[in-house]
Image (cartoon, grey):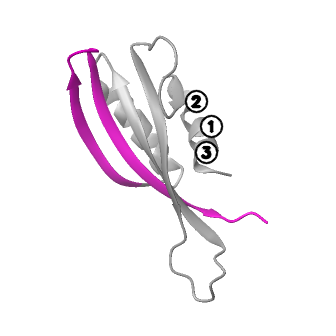
Amino acid sequence: MTILENLNTLLADIGAPIETGSFSGKAPSEYIVIVPMTDTFHLHADNTPNAEVQDARLSIFTQGNYKKLKNSIVKALLSDDFTITDRRYIGFETDTGYHHYVVDIEKNYELED
């Protein structure tokens, strides 16, 4: 499994549309964009890693109060053993009318043969 598959499955029940990279088409009043960031091998003793750490950024866009959507996402992530490495309010985009909030996450995945 990859972090994208994991996140799309996990966040489907949140109710906000989800896209990867950028939102295509006419944007709804709230949506989530997943941006995959890195796949790394952490320390291993024999140069044969058996797991990797994948991380991504969830960009939350909403024209209403972002806190309810953010809290639902954070709760779902923590219940599925994601590590949250950063959460921050980016700002209000005056040209689009959206609040922008990001949640950076990572999770360990065993390497598939």
Mark toward the start of the polypeptide (2 vs 3) = 3
Residue 101 is left or right of residue 111, and the answer is left
Instruction: Determine crowd level at label 1: few under 14, some 14-19, many 20+ residues with C-alpha closer than 10 A.
Output: few
**Which label belongs to residue 12?**
2
Name the foreground residue: 16 vs 54.
54
Residue at the image position 48 percent from the left and 23 percent from the top:
23
Magenta region: 84-113
Give the residue pinned by disc 1: 9
Quadrant in the picture for residue 110: bottom right
Kind of element beneath mark 1: helix
Residue 53 drawn in magenta:
no
Mark 3–mark 1 distance (CA, rounded to whole Å)? 5 Å
| Residue 50 as seen in the image, left or right of residue 60 | right
Q: Amino acid at mark 2?
A: Ala
Q: Which residue is mark 3?
A: 6
Task: Where is residue 83? Give x, y as percent.
Answer: 43, 57
